[in-house]
Image (cartoon, rainbow, N blue to C red):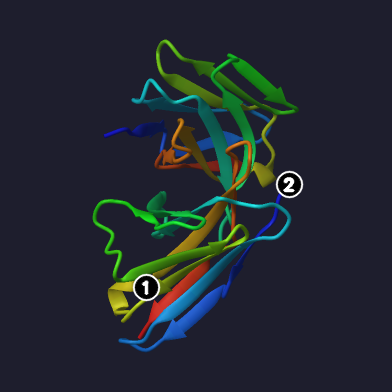
C-alpha cells in the first residue's frame, strides 16, 4: 500500500513555543490530506482538511490561528502548533487521500508541552 | 450533523471464534465505507473497504457487509487469532472525501 511519513514521531516543547509537524506522501500525490487528534482510548477527531494550493478547512471548534496548516505541494502538508500549552499535549496524526479516496495514515506525533 | 455509531465499544471473544462489529451512519449520501485496524501505539491501517455499489466483500478471514437501505454496515472476522487484538474503526465517506469515524471497538482475543 501507499506510504505516508510523519515527523517528528515525538516532541517535547516548552509552553509558549511553536512546533511543526510534517506529513509526506512518499509514493503518491495527495491533493487532500487530513489532520487528526487522537486522545487516549478514543477515536480520531478530525481537526482540518488540508488542500494543496488553497486554505485548509477547519472543523468547528478548532482554532485556525493556533493550528496553522500549509499544503504547499502534492506530497507535503505541515501542521504548526503555535504558542503551545499543556492542554495541546496529544497525539496528532495525519492522513493522505489517494485517487480512490483511500486514506493512508502517518505514524503520528506525540506532543508533550511542559 | 452526520455521525457514525459503532458497537460494541469492547468485544472479547475466544480465539477461533468469530467477531462482529456493527456501524450505522446517518448521511444517506455516504458511498464509501472503510474499516481500519489500529494496534497499540501504531497508525490506523486499512483492512477492508466497501463501496455502495456492492453489498458484501470478503478478504480471507475478513468480510464486510453493507445494507444501504438500513444504513448500516458490519465487519466480520472469522477464526480469530491473537494478532487480531486491536482497536477497529469504521468510517463513512461521501463526495466531499471526508470520513466520519465511529468511536472504535476494542477487540480482545482470549487464548
Residue A96 coordinates in the image, percent (x, y): 57, 52
The CA distance from mark 1 to mark 2 is 30 Å
Residue B97 shows in the view? yes
State the SS at label 1: loop
Few, some or many residues within 10 Å of mark 1 (<14, 14–19, 20+)? some
Find the residue positioned furthest to the front. Answer: A53
* Image quadrant in which you'd find residue A3: bottom right
* Image quadrant in which you'd find residue A15: bottom left
In this rendering, do the residues under marks 1 and 2 share a single chain? yes
Tell whether A9 sits left or right of A70.
right
Seen from the viewer's position, the closer of residues B95 and B72 is B95
Seen from the viewer's position, the closer of residues A33 and A42 is A33
Seen from the viewer's position, the closer of residues A86 and B2 is B2
* Image quadrant in which you'd find residue B26: top left
Q: Which mark is residue B53?
A: none
State the SS at label 2: loop
Residue A102 coordinates in the image, percent (x, y): 60, 40
Question: Of callouts 1 and 2, which one flags the residue occurring earlier in the amino acid sequence?
Answer: 2
Kindly identify which residue carries mark 2.
A1
Residue B111 shows in the view? no
Find the residue positioned furthest to the left. Answer: A61
Kindly identify which residue carries mark 1.
A89
Tell whether B15 sits left or right of A82.
right
Few, some or many residues within 10 Å of mark 2 (<14, 14–19, 20+)? few
Find the residue positioned furthest to the bottom. Answer: A14
Residue located at (58% from left, 15% from top): B53
The image shows residue A60, relative to residue B96, as above or below, that is: below
Residue located at (38% from left, 52% from top): A45
Seen from the viewer's position, the closer of residues B91 and B103 is B91
Amino acid at each position: 500500500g501507499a506510504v505516508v511519513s510523519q515527523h517528528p514521531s515525538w516532541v517535547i516543547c516548552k509552553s509558549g513555543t511553536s512546533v511543526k509537524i510534517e506529513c509526506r506522501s512518499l509514493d503518491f500525490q495527495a491533493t487532500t490530506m487530513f489532520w487528526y487528534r487522537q486522545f487516549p482510548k478514543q477515536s480520531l477527531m478530525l481537526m482540518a482538511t488540508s488542500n494543496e494550493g488553497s486554505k485548509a478547512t477547519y472543523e468547528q471548534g478548532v482554532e485556525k490561528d493556533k493550528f496553522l496548516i500549509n499544503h504547499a505541494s502534492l506530497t507535503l502538508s505541515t501542521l504548526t502548533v503555535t504558542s503551545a500549552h499543556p492542554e495541546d499535549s496529544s497525539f496528532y496524526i495525519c492522513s493522505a487521500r489517494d485517487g480512490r479516496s483511500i486514506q493512508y495514515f502517518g505514524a503520528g506525533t506525540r506532543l508533550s508541552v511542559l | 450533523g452526520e455521525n457514525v455509531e459503532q458497537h460494541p465499544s469492547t468485544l472479547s471473544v475466544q480465539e477461533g471464534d468469530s467477531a462482529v462489529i456493527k456501524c450505522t451512519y446517518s448521511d444517506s449520501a455516504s458511498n464509501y465505507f472503510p474499516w481500519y485496524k489500529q494496534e497499540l501505539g501504531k497508525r490506523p491501517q486499512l483492512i477492508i473497504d466497501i463501496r455502495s455499489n456492492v453489498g458484501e466483500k470478503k478478504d480471507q478471514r475478513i468480510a464486510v457487509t453493507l445494507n444501504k437501505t438500513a444504513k448500516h454496515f458490519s465487519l466480520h472476522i472469522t477464526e480469530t487469532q491473537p494478532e487480531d487484538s486491536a482497536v477497529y474503526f469504521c468510517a463513512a465517506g461521501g463526495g466531499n472525501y471526508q470520513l466520519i469515524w465511529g468511536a472504535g471497538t476494542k477487540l480482545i482475543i482470549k487464548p
